[in-house]
Image (cartoon, helix red, strand yellow):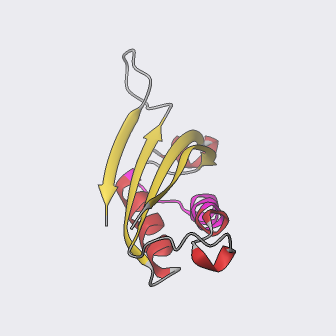
Amino acid sequence: MYKIKLNNMKFKAHIGVLPEEKVVGQNIEVDLIVETNFDFSGLDQLEETLSYVDFYEATAQIIATSRADLIENLAFEIIRAVKASSERIAAVEIHLRKLAVPIEGIFDSAEIEMRG
């Protein structure tokens, strides 16, 4: 078993509870951790691992089309899509950050962490 990590992926999303969030959009960041359920054999062959390109593309596609109210829903959809891509995936963990949150105050982001 080992993990594949995609760190600090950046996307423009049109999600949020407030109507203007869906119109204007906002920047989000995603960290994705995919835990395999097999051991690497040591062979230098693509068939011996999973494609992180597939994970990135699934994440990008979901974010591009989602109009979810909650970042939890977006995270759940990404986990579900990544897990469905291979039976060789034991678990998927996601950290999803909304960088421009409509809250008066000073902070970098609002983040959720989910594992499935």
Residue 79 seen anywhere in this rendered image of the structure: yes
The answer to whether residue 70 shows anywhere in this view is: no
The secondary structure making up most of the magenta span is helix
60 on left or right of 70: right
Q: Which residues are magenta?
A: 56-71
Q: Compared with residue 2, is residue 23 higher up or lower down, i.e. above or below? A: above
Q: Where does the N terminus fall, quadrant-wise?
A: bottom left
Q: Residue furthest bottom?
A: 87
Q: Position of residue 15 (x, y in %)?
A: 50, 51
Asked whether, in this view, residue 68 is left or right of residue 9, the answer is: left
Image quadrant where residue 66 sits: bottom right
Displayed quadrant of residue 114? bottom left
Question: Relative to residue 83, is residue 59 drawn left or right?
Answer: right
Residue 85 coordinates in the image, percent (x, y): 53, 79
Of residues 92 and 103, the one nearer the viewer is 92
**Which residue is pictured at 44% across the width and 32% down the height?**
101
Which of the 4 image quadrants contains residue 37?
A: bottom left
Q: Quadrant of the C terminus?
A: bottom left
Labels in figure, total? 0
Q: Nearer the viewer, residue 88 or 77?
A: 88
Q: Residue 102, image x and y in percent? A: 43, 30
